[in-house]
Image: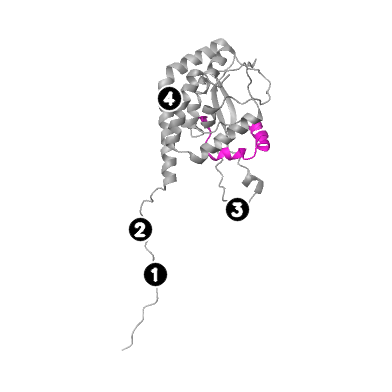
Amino acid sequence: MATTLAPHLPERSITLVHPTALRPLDRERGARRLLNIIVATAGLLVALPLILVIAVLVKLTSRGPVLFQQSRVGLDRRSLSRVGGNTRRHLDLGGQPFTMYKFRTMYTHRGTRERQVWAQPDDQRVTPIGRILRKLRLDELPQLINVLRGEMNVVGPRPEQPDIFVYLREQIEGYQRRQRVRPGITGWAQVNQAYDRSIDDVRRKVTLDLEYIRRQSALEDVKIMWRTLPVMVLGRGAW
């Protein structure tokens, strides 16, 4: 009796779908994002009466909009491991531009585009109410909206203006590495150093920013947020 051999069929692999466990780094990122959403939402709700008062004062004391909007350089979302393509683009950690919000603290100049420069002590462009807001860092409150939009974190390196960013990237080695994390309203550099006056000031802040990036965590962010409070209340390092 002839034996009929069945045709050989390729083995079919069966994939069992299981939820993939989050890596420690992924869990940490998720925890930090949740922390930012909670802090930004709570901050806006608690500070709402103060925000309304500031908005009225800004509007009544000088001409111009209540909010100041400015392009800043944000997170670099490009993969550092990607191969090929434009090499200069691959190595450039310039980051994604976004619109940052602040309470307006300077007089407006209609029809002219001012050169992007740092503010200086006794800057004549700053309004009287703006000087108080800057001293207490209250002009930064609208950036909580940027946090909710995912463009910023509460804690991180301060975002810079595009023209100044290009200049600093050429002057300071490793400056663009700051863009590997979301920029922040406050940061390790901000609680340890005053506003920038020179390239040397920026160079010291970059060192502090990179130190923060190496040890960033949700707990570290909470510590920096806590240390920011006396900086605001005492008006340290601002003008």
Q: CA distance from mark 4 to mark 2?
A: 44 Å
Q: Amino acid at mark 1?
A: Glu
According to the image, label 3 marks what residue?
A: 83
Q: Amino acid at mark 4?
A: Gly
Q: Which residue sits at x=56%, y=30%?
A: 99
Q: Which residue sits at x=55%, y=40%?
A: 180
- Given contact means CB atoms under 8 Å apart, are the residues at marks 4 and 2 in contact? no
According to the image, label 1 marks what residue?
A: 11
Horizontal side of residue 25 vs 16, given as left or right: right
Q: Which mark is residue 34?
A: none
Label located before the other in sequence (3 or 4): 4
Instruction: Tell me if residue 172 comes above or below residue 80 in the rendering.
Output: above
- Given contact means CB atoms under 8 Å apart, are the residues at marks 2 and 3 in contact? no
Q: Which mark is residue 43?
A: 4
Q: Amino acid at mark 3?
A: Val
* Image location of residue 129, percent across then percent down: 55, 13
Residue 27 in sight here: yes
Q: Nearer the viewer, mark 4 or mark 2?
A: 4
Q: Which residue sits at x=54%, y=25%?
A: 101
Q: Residues within 10 Å of mark 3 (few under 14, many from 20)?
A: few
Q: Secondary structure at mark 1?
A: loop
Label located before the other in sequence (2 or 1): 1
Q: Residues within 10 Å of mark 4 (few under 14, many from 20)?
A: few
Bounds of the magenta span?
A: 161-187
Q: Residues within 10 Å of mark 2 (few under 14, many from 20)?
A: few
Count the marks.
Answer: 4
